[in-house]
Amino acid sequence: MKLRIIAHAGCTDGYGSAFVVKKYGKYLIHAPITKDDLAHAEILPFYPGDVQTGNFAFTSGDIVVDLPRPKSDILFWCDHHATTKPESGEPLPQNNYWKITPSCTGYLLDLAFQNGLNATPELREFQKVMDTIDAAEYTPAEIKECYYSPSDFNNLTALQKIHAIGSMFNTRDRILNLEIFKTLLTARLGETPLSSPALWQLNPLMFYRAQLLSYQEWRENVDTYLVYDADAKCVVQDDRKTAMTRGVADRFYACIKFPQSSYNLSLKPIDPETMRLGLGSNIFHKERCKVDLGKLCRDVGKKFGTGAGGGHYYVGGGVIKTENGDAGIEYVLKKLKEGENK
Ligand SMILES: [Mn+2]
């Protein structure tokens, strides 16, 4: 059977999810598929909007993970985003899974464990760090370890190792990122990415060293225009205010620089017509988050874009039209302020 694994592009959890279905699919997919089918599955990195717009023709051999559920029948679907919750009353068909969990990778591993996969210490460790990364459950010390230079590159923790792998498909070149994402999943897979020889031969440390320098460069540039809106308790990063974006975005910098904040909002031009709006809560103070940010982003995508938007309670994103940039920011800040006064 011709299989395709369609996973969340540019996302470490998307990568981890694709890894788990490819390696342990026989514990997950109830269908007559062989090890060979899985080993030869084509890898397609997609963004959530690619599924939501409905322009892609899915087939009955498609495995979709960490992404919204396609409208047509596919082989297997698993997701953990609040905004992709299936309508209530509609029972999910076989091989379809949805639940709010810290990471989709961790959810898939739990399903595989239930079906007889032996939960080895390495698999457990992989699951734990994927949950930390995707649910942003880092301690401030872990953020320092993963986003600033580690004291010892030769003795990375499991968390740092996964960051090093993620750095390979988070360069400034989108096409290269997609190619690396596919290549990492096409090579022979070890027990987990932490110990896959083919992957570590590609020298993730080289990418990670560069990424950490790129984070630093980005932080220095963003310092010139990152502002704090005290009324909305929100840090605002409007990339239209910089002539040139430099380095690679450190998505938790706002929480480090403005510890008093509850939220952070970013607006990034994608092309002349569209911009990406990202919204997150302060990861060290999630208790301050009074608004369902995934839902708000879904509204924003519908109201100011062409419909792409969603996420989790504590973090979300969406695509808006360039001409709606100011209105999108204003709307979000207004909703955050209303949340404070509720
Ligand atoms: Mn995820």
Image (cartoon, helix red, strand yellow):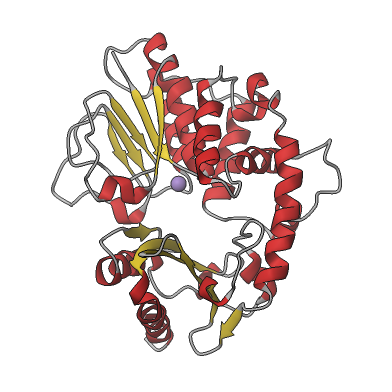
Residue at image coords 46%, 40%: 14
Query: What is the x, y in percent for residue 130?
Result: 56, 42
Residue at image coords 82%, 37%: 155
Front residue of 337/177: it is 177
Q: Is residue 15 visible?
A: yes
Q: Is residue 115 visible?
A: no
Determine the residue located farthest toward the left in the rendered image. Answer: 89
Front residue of 162/271: it is 271
Query: What is the x, y in percent for residue 245?
Result: 61, 64
Q: Quadrant of the N terminus?
A: top left
Image height of 225 relative to 183, above or below = below
Viewed as shown, does residue 289 lie left or right of 206? left
Image height of 204 relative to 287, above or below = above
Tell me the quarter of the picture where residue 294 sits. Answer: bottom left
Residue at image coords 38%, 50%: 100
Viewed as shown, does residue 223 lie left or right of 137? right
Viewed as shown, does residue 211 lie left or right of 66? right
Query: What is the x, y in percent for residue 305?
Result: 29, 66
Query: What is the x, y in percent for residue 240?
Result: 51, 74
How many marks can you see? 0
Front residue of 228/155: it is 228
Q: Quadrant of the C terminus?
A: bottom left
